[in-house]
Image (cartoon, grey):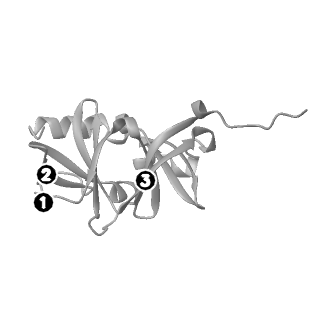
């Protein structure tokens, strides 16, 4: 008698699925501390365009990064949701267009980034896949905010 194949839960990873501009993004749930409506953001001179500035979240000054602008570049409308994450022990907020919800997705659906996507923000991704026939960026919070940017943020005394 044939035994039906069942995907093992251990092959799936819990991620918060968000939309940032034209990208769907999977953020590991273990890195997410909360989601909320956008809070007031104070711009800070000298930061890359995708760093919107700082906000006060739970009594701490926290850098705000527009995830869609980081991935796609250019000028993009402000996001409608904040996703707070921990990046190497420091709080960071990703500004996104929409939070879709927690999903359990297989990492096996990911491809490593192709030569066409090497460079820039795509080097900060764990991989690229497809969700609902759209691009899915699998984020690694330890890599998405690169050391030089995190060092710059921390040297400004934001956190």
Q: Position of residue 149 (x, y in %)?
A: 25, 40
Q: Label 1: how many residues lie within 10 Å, few (<14), some (14-19) or many (20+)?
A: few
Distance CA(mark 1)–CA(mark 3) = 24 Å
**Numbered disc 1: secondary structure:** loop
Q: Earlier in the sequence, mark 1 or mark 2?
A: 1
Query: 145 or 97, which is in the foreground?
Result: 97
Residue, disc 2: 55
Disc number at residue 101?
Answer: 3
Direction right: furthest residue: 1
Residue at coordinates 71% horizontally, 37% vertically from top-left?
6
Residue, disc 1: 40
Q: Is residue 28 left or right of residue 156?
A: right
Q: Position of residue 78 (x, y in %)?
A: 26, 66
Residue at coordinates 20% horizontally, 34% vertically from top-left?
151
Q: Earlier in the sequence, mark 3 or mark 2?
A: 2
Q: Position of residue 103 (x, y in %)?
A: 50, 47
Dividing the picture into quadrants, the one containing residue 106 is: top right
Distance CA(mark 3)–CA(mark 2) = 23 Å
Residue at coordinates 29% horizontally, 69% vertically from top-left?
77
Above or below for 121 versus 10: below
Residue at coordinates 10% horizontally, 57% vertically from top-left?
42
């Amino acid at each position: 008698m044939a035994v039906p194949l069942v995907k093992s839960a251990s092959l799936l990873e819990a991620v918060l699925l968000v939309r940032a501009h034209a990208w769907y993004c999977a953020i590991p749930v273990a890195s997410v501390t909360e989601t909320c409506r956008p809070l007031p953001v104070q711009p800070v001179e000298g930061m890359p365009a995708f760093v919107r500035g700082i906000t006060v979240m739970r009594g701490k000054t926290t850098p705000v990064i527009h995830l869609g602008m980081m991935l796609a570049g250019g000028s993009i409308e402000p996001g409608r949701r904040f996703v707070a994450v921990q990046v190497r022990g420091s709080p960071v907020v990703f500004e996104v267009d929409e939070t879709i919800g927690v999903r359990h997705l297989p990492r096996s659906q990911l491809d490593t980034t192709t030569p066409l996507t090497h460079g820039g923000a795509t080097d900060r991704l764990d991989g690229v896949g497809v969700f609902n026939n759209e691009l899915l960026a699998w984020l690694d919070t330890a890599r998405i905010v690169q050391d030089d940017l995190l060092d710059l943020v921390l040297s400004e005394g934001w956190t």
